[in-house]
Amino acid sequence: MTEKNVLGGPLEVCCTAPLTGFYRDGYCRTDQYDRGKHVLCTIVTQAFLEYSKAQGNDLMTAIPEYGFLGLEAGDSWCLCVSRWAEAYHAGVAPPVKLSASHEKALTVVSIKMLLSKAIDETVS
């Protein structure tokens, strides 16, 4: 894979259980078909899940016909960068794994915002 993360390194896998990403391949990669830009690898929190539901995107309820089992706090998930930014400004943005977050996130949010929520052990 030649895609880069927000730190300039190779994009790492976000999560395979549950299987995440716009292409459901575990990576927060994107292209012109991904209107939501699912580029941030996060560890969802209960506060974020409730916020997202209140905004009209219920990530907790299973949708079996799409193979979606619903998310619980602690799950890794590729989020839309614009929703994460909204949650950031509302004070409920979930933590971000920078090594698995696509560099295209930086067209919407700053690296400073991401660093403030970073969970990567190699980032200080």
Image (cartoon, grey):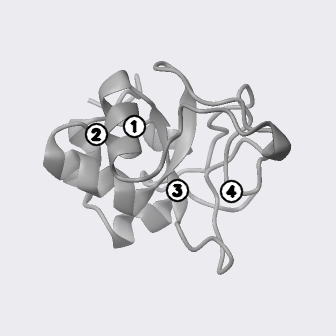
**Contact flag, marks 4 and 3 (Cβ < 8 Å):** no
Q: Which residue, given by chain and number where applicable, does mark 3 sit on?
A: 39
Q: Quadrant location of residue 47?
A: top left
Sequence-first disc among 3 and 1: 3
Q: Which residue, given by chain and number where applicable, does mark 2 sit on?
A: 93
Q: Amino acid at mark 1?
A: Val
**Horizontal relation, residue 38 to residue 30: left or right:** left
Secondary element at tag 2: loop
Secondary element at tag 4: loop
**Contact flag, marks 2 and 1 (Cβ < 8 Å):** yes
Q: Residue at x 68, y 47 (%)?
A: 27
- Numbered circle sitting on residue 96: 1
The picture places residue 100, in percent across and down from the top left corner, at 55, 43
Q: CA distance from mark 3 to mark 1?
A: 11 Å
Q: Residue at x 66, y 74 (%)?
A: 31
Name the one closer to the observer, 121 or 33. Answer: 33
